[in-house]
Structures are given as C-alpha cells and as structure tokens.
Image: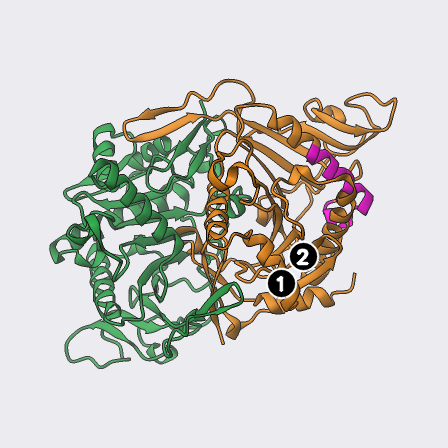
Chain colours: A orange, B green
Amino acid sequence: MPELRKDPVIGRWVIIATERAKRPKDFKVEKEEAKKGPCPFCKGNEDQTPGEIFALRRSRTKPNQPGWDVRVVPSISPLLAAEGDLGRRGKGMYDLMNDVGAHEVVIETPEHIANIADLEEGQIAKVIDCYVERFLQLEKDKRFKYVLMFKNHGRAAGGGSLQHARSQLIATPVNPKRVKEELAGARKYFEYKERCVFCDIVKQELKQKERVIIDIDGLIAISPFASRFPFETWILPKKHSCNFYDIKPAQRRDLAGIIKRVMLKLKVALNDPPYNYVLHTAPFRRPKGGYWKTIDADYHWHIEIMPRLTHVAGFEWGTGFYLNPTSPEDAAKILRETKI
Amino acid sequence: MPELRKDPVIGRWVIIATERAKRPKDFKVEKEEAKKGPCPFCKGNEDQTPGEIFALRRSRTKPNQPGWDVRVVPSISPLLAAEGDLGRRGKGMYDLMNDVGAHEVVIETPEHIANIADLEEGQIAKVIDCYVERFLQLEKDKRFKYVLMFKNHGRAAGGGSLQHARSQLIATPVNPKRVKEELAGARKYFEYKERCVFCDIVKQELKQKERVIIDIDGLIAISPFASRFPFETWILPKKHSCNFYDIKPAQRRDLAGIIKRVMLKLKVALNDPPYNYVLHTAPFRRPKGGYWKTIDADYHWHIEIMPRLTHVAGFEWGTGFYLNPTSPEDAAKILRETKI
C-alpha cells in the first residue's frame, strides 16, 4: 500500500507511490553527446584552466604542469567573488549582501574519465584528502560560514557536457537553508531524546536491514526511509561525527571504497544516470550554547546521492512535497543485488 | 554587482548572478513532440477519462457528454487514494501514514489548446470558479489539511506530452513543508512588526516599481526580490486575504485577466517555456491561538509561476541554495516591455 513517510530529521513528507512502482528499466536515461575539442581538465592541458589553488602532485613536479593526481582550480564562472567584504545591508524590508565567497573545481583525475564510479579506490581516497585540505583552508577565512561540496554528473543534473570527473566547492557567507533545517531538526530531536537523530537512523537501519545497500566497518550506505527520489542513497559514518573534515586518514580509504561501490552500483543498475551528489557537514563557527557548548551532538555528516531519473518532480519546487515512485526498500534490494 | 538576497518570508538566500546575466535569448527551450492519437481531454472524448467529479456545463447537457466549459475528473494515476483512513503510525523512530487524499485534474478548456496563455479571459475566470468550487468541497472532508493547486506545463516541468491545458488539485492529509515554512515565516514577521509580510512586500514593490510587471486594481504581478529562477513571477492580491477560495466573484475576472497577461508575456518573451505554476493558500483548519485566534494575518494567498529555463539548478535540490542568472529587475523590465 502506498504510504506517506516523514523524514525524521527535517519533517518533510514524501509520497512513496508503490502502486505504480518503478523499476530501473522504467527510467529513460538520455545519453548525451560529449563536448568536442580538448578537455581543459586533462593532464597536459593545465594552461586551459586558471592557475591551481592546490594539487596533490608527485614530488619535483611544478604547479600548473603535469604530474598531479588531484588538482583544484578556481571556477572559470564563479558564483561568488573571492575578494571584497560582505556589506550586509537592508533595502526597505529586504536584506542583501555582496556575493563574497569562493568557488573551486576539484579535478578528480588527470585522465579523461567521466564518472567517479570508474576511478580507482586509491584515487577517490586522494580526492577525499583534497576535500579535507580545502575545508581546513577555507575554514580559516572568517567570512565563510559553510563549504558546499557537490558534484553534478550529466547534463540533466546541471553537469554540462564536459565529461571529466570533478566536484565543486563553494564557500558561502551564509548557511544554506537545508543545512539550517537539518541542524534545527537534529537539535530538536536531541533535546527530546538526548541522542543524535542520524545515529538513531544508523541504528534502526542496521537492525531492520531492508534499506541497507552496503554495510562495512565504520560506514553504511542506505536508501533513506523517506527518500525523495528513486534510488536516492545516503552514505553515513556509523560513529557519531559532526564535521566531515575531522575524518581520520585511515577512514578515508574506507569512505573511498564505499563511494566507489555505491557509485558503480548506481551506474550499472541505472545505465549511468545523471546525478547530484552533496556532502552535508556542520557549518563552521556555528553558534553554541546550552547542550551545544560541550557536545557536538547537533549534526552528523553524510553524503546524499540523488540520481536524476524523473521529470515527475514538477510541483516539488513550489511545495516541498515529494513523490517517489520507487520504494526505498525496492531500491536498496536492487542495489544490493547489483553485481559490480 | 552580484548579490546574495534573502527571501523575506522563509529566509532562503539566493545568489543573483548579474555578472553572467542571462537574457531571454540565452535560454534554449526544447520543443517537444505532441503525443499522437486522440486527446482524452477534448470535447467528444469524455469517455476516455474517469467519470467527472464536477463540471461547469451549459444547461440541459448531461455529465460525461459534451457541453462543458471546465471539467474536473479524477487523475488516472492518482498520487493519493481517495478512500480509507490515515492510519498514522510509527515504525521504530519513523512516522508514516496511509496515502489518503484526492487527486483531480481540472480540464481548463474543451478545445485542444496547450497553454492557459491562449485561453480567453472569460474561460480562465471559469477555471477559477471551478477551483473555488472544488476547494469548498474538499475542505469539508475532515481528513484533508491542504489542497495543492498546480500546473505542470511542458515535459521539462513534469507536464508530459499531452498538450491540453489542465491543472491538478491534490488534497493532502498533511501540510506541505513549504507552506508550513511560509506560515512560520509570516507569523514571525507579524509578531515582530504587527503587519503581514506579504502586504509589506506588495507595498514596497508598488513604491519601488522596478520589479512590478503588471499593476491593476486589486492585484499585482511581480518578479520577487529573491527570485529563485529566471523570470519567476508572483501574482498577489493587494488587499490582505488569507484563503484563496474567499475570492469574490468580481475579483475572479480581474485575476483571470492578470493571469492571462502574465502567461502570455512569459510565452512571448521566452518562446513558450515549460513552467510550473503553484497556488499558495492557507491550510484548512490550521491551529489558531494568540494573535491567530481572531485575525487571519498569518498568510496571504498568491500564485507562483516558475519557468523552467535552467538546468543549472543541480545542487539546489540538496542544499536549498539557489542561483539565479537573471536579476528580478531585468526580468520585470523585459516582461513589462513585452508586447502582447
């Protein structure tokens, strides 16, 4: 029977429309034409991007030359300007500020490979090292409250036609609304239960098993109970951890492994779908007080992967009400059974 | 200079990226192939839909026969089931309920016309009459908290390939998250200012003029200050009004007129873009207390029209952070100057 399910963190209701359940073959994935011409993100073409901000390089190689494994460059069309002050101000009843921030592109491989699913586990671990490095650097700039790390893969997901694996980092002077909602939801839950809501999700999923895709030491991948999208997948650390960039080097390899397997399962099961992939982590410098002075219980970092399979999402934009034609239990089962 | 702007109702920040400003010709609107075969929504094909729930008909015509002007039928693939009880329950830490509700299609014309922009003003007024009638009926069912009225036009907006103007009504047993956020935001503003936030928006827009598209007696169409999407347009009554279905018959004709002109301007300026169109109105039976016991100051109905012009919206799904490449001031100016 179809159900209305409530997200336990932010309270959003989702319609799980099991009666017109959709299986992978029901989704049409449009194949895109690759962009012609040399790829600015490939090794040897370093002069086609702005100068690098950071790179993991083999020793004795020079900046903006080959020899790198992961390379971070400024976006050529930045959403936020790197220089200047915020100038927060009012205009009648409205509030606005200058768009100060940073917008960086993390080139995940020197080879021309489109999907993170096709990178080696060791290479993905280097990408994670690189994120941590950039988070630590950007955290030092007192103007920034948050760093968004996201990937848009495929044109329908906003990824453009350039088929070279990369992620983006945007440092913002305000917290994204979704992050604020999650923090508020997690705090409310903690005040009531004295437990982290994400820790409780992990516990219940491990017990119930039906929505678990991959369960390894320290990390799980699940189809969340109130998934908004078919085959939506979250990766969470099992142990409570508020800030992504606190991840220990030893755990980075495990995270790389589970990312590789999840992304490959999605690629195989769903015919290389377009997707968005967003890291959710606690804001820098968040206000502390009461409970939050001593304990970091108000957040639990995780990665949300959203394949873009449906156009059905018409009215969701305007209402915040989601319709998902594939139950999370079916999605998890299909992905568990997908051979990679 | 590019700006970060805050929505005064729900506090969402939007990046207005004026430095890569987009004009109408920068957006590529893909033309869709019309579905082949007879249209189930055209007059004469009444037997191809489920039996009608309501219709505005000429006298002496029979249900499910020609002679109607606007016709309401159940959706053939309803998102919510019309029968049954809610069965609200828990499953460990999760909450769920049965998907009880109603899902109706309002066929806006007996002729095969795709876009509401191309209907006569008098016909649009009849569609509005029909909405009011259905809201009043659905309000009587105590299981329902809200009725969503929305339109998905064009495939990219979730409208499918059937090119016949229609809107959808979904009665839900829970309030959509977005509506709850707007109510909470409007209440907070009212508690502080003792004024309706939407009334203040109307006042400031009428004074500043630069974001006004159409200003008629009783109603305005504006590009909102913190527009999420290029050419996003809101239509609001100037006088405070909480519930859409309280609209007086005399004002319905004016509303039809402004809808017609806004939709035609969008069609002409943007080459018949796909769009979503959502009515925001107060929930049925909302909790009252304090201020809210005697005054209906916590909401102000309006229509939000969102042309779907960009794929750029990749990470917005995950973060609630929007990027808009066309400033609302430019959009309003272009639409003001568009000849219809």
Q: Quadrant of the N terminus of chain B?
A: top left
Please give the count of numbered marks on the rendered protein. Answer: 2
Find disc 2 in the rendering and name its residue: A221
Disc 2 marks a residue whose amino acid type is: Ala
What secondary structure is the stretch in magenta mostly built from?
helix
Is residue B101 left or right of B216 when viewed as pictured?
right
Disc 2 from disc 1: Cα separation: 10 Å
Find disc 1 in the rendering and name its residue: A205
Label 2: chain letter:
A
Disc 1 marks a residue whose amino acid type is: Glu
Q: Which mark is residue B257?
A: none
Question: Regarding mark 1 in the picture, which secondary structure is present there?
Answer: helix
Q: Is residue A297 above or below residue B140?
A: above
Q: Is residue B212 above or below residue A178?
A: above
Q: Nearer the viewer, residue B194 or A44?
A: B194
Q: Mark 2 vs mark 1: which is more N-terminal?
A: 1
Kindly identify the residue that appears in the image at 40 percent across and 23 percent down.
Answer: A88
Give the residues drawn in magenta, as a range: A114-132
Q: List x then y, in percent, for residue B230.
A: 42, 39
Residue B60 occupies quadrant: bottom left
Q: Is residue B164 above or below residue B257?
A: below
Kindly identify the residue that appears in the image at 49 percent across and 39 percent down.
Answer: A176
